[in-house]
Amino acid sequence: MNYYLKSLVNRLSELKLNAFLVTNTVNVQYLTGFTGHDSFLLVTPQKSYLITDFRYITQAEGEIKDKDIAIVRHKNVIIKKTVEILNSSKFRTRNRVGFESQFISLATFKDFRNHLKKGFRFIPTVDVIESLRAIKTPEEIEKIRKSVKSAAEAFNKIRGFVKPGLSEKEIANQLDYLMKSAGAQGAAFTIVAIDERAALPHAPLSSKKTTSSCAILFDWGACVDEYYSDMTRVIFLGRISPKAKELYKIVAEAQAQAIALCKPGEVIQNVDLAARGYIRKKGYGKYFGHGLGHGIGRMVHELPRLRYTNKEILKPGMVVTIEPGIYLPGRIGIRLEDMILITENGCEVMTSGVPKELSQIMG
């Protein structure tokens, strides 16, 4: 049994579950190594069952190396085949079956419940597998490093491409191309926002063009081996305004104070409040309205959530983002984001190869 699947099996007794039904595609991939879609994974202490259809049988047979996972084909209705396995006399688990409540609709839940034999209880759970995914293995960390490398190489090249007269869409398309050229499967996402559009934290790409004197916010990431990167930088073409310079220095210092707290055992709340408190002290508290960061791995946003309300602690193996920002509507937005690996003794800034000192980011 592979490490990831074994970690879930080991939690079943703690959760007082006899089996677990995984329906979220990312979680199925995480536990099995199978990269297809539209499949369920039924996990028991003795055996697990990947339930898929004709399109993915050969792929699953090639990707799944774990002999404790049986590959089962359904012909039309995946729920019907799953219930058939649960109701089978060969299936010894006949009590509490956990399921991912945030990924199953009420209609699907009722369908399962109505077709299961008496004796089964369908138990809703939240973030069971996501909490396992929050701690990365050395193999996962290496994949994330490759993703960071692709994204960093692309950004360092895009800086030579940017000039007055290019639109956000044109710059983003080139950045996506450069990430693929650097070994990425593709872009995780790409935000390019010029001047006042950077005040939109998740600005959609537009036709707005660069000028001889403007600020450009980049928020981008790559996908390599199913693992993601995520970072944010701002570069300036021509003269930097006094206001932009002031905001940049505040955000950079807020980020530095938060990163300094990143170590095992630190309460996440304290990390967020370090950056938030500094920005508030400088008079811009109401212009920083989102959480400080998030975990990253097989998804761009995953556990842990770095918020001032989160009293969980940081643990070795977590990879998180630290991304404070100040957004002045209609004027400018400044955000800096780095990826941080929590180590046994402190932390490592995984994105340190992407320049962010003011002297380095002038166009």
Image (cartoon, rainbow, N blue to C red):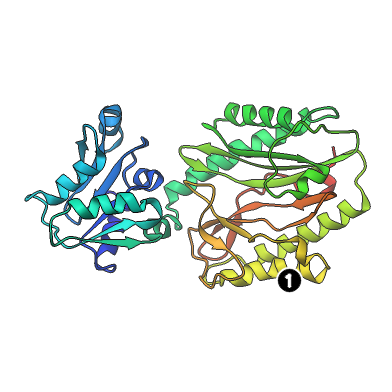
- Above-or-below relation of 270 to 42: below
Going 86% across and 29% down the picture, which residue do you hit? 164
Q: Position of residue 3 (x, y in %)?
A: 31, 52
Residue 171, quarter of the rendered image: top right
Q: Nearer the viewer, residue 65 or 250?
A: 250
- Is 114 on the left-hand or right-hand side of 291? left
Residue 234 visible in the displayed image: yes
**Label 1 crowd (10 A; few <14 / some 14-19 / many >=20):** some
Q: Nearer the viewer, residue 23 or 70?
A: 23
- Is 141 on the left-hand or right-hand side of 59? right
Residue 66 visible in the displayed image: no
Going 78% across and 52% down the picture, which residue do you hit? 334
Q: Nearer the viewer, residue 27 or 362?
A: 27
Q: Nearer the viewer, residue 287 or 266?
A: 287
- Is 252 on the left-hand or right-hand side of 174? right
- Above-or-below relation of 117 to 168: below
Label 1 belongs to which residue?
277
Q: Position of residue 192 (x, y in %)?
A: 72, 38
Q: Position of residue 92 (x, y in %)?
A: 10, 56
Amino acid of disc 1: Gly
- Above-or-below relation of 200 to 8: above
Question: Which element is circle 1 on?
Answer: helix
- Is 14 on the left-hand or right-hand side of 85? right
Q: Position of residue 363 (x, y in %)?
A: 84, 37
Going 59% across and 26% down the picture, which residue do you hit? 181
Total number of numbered discs in the rendering: 1
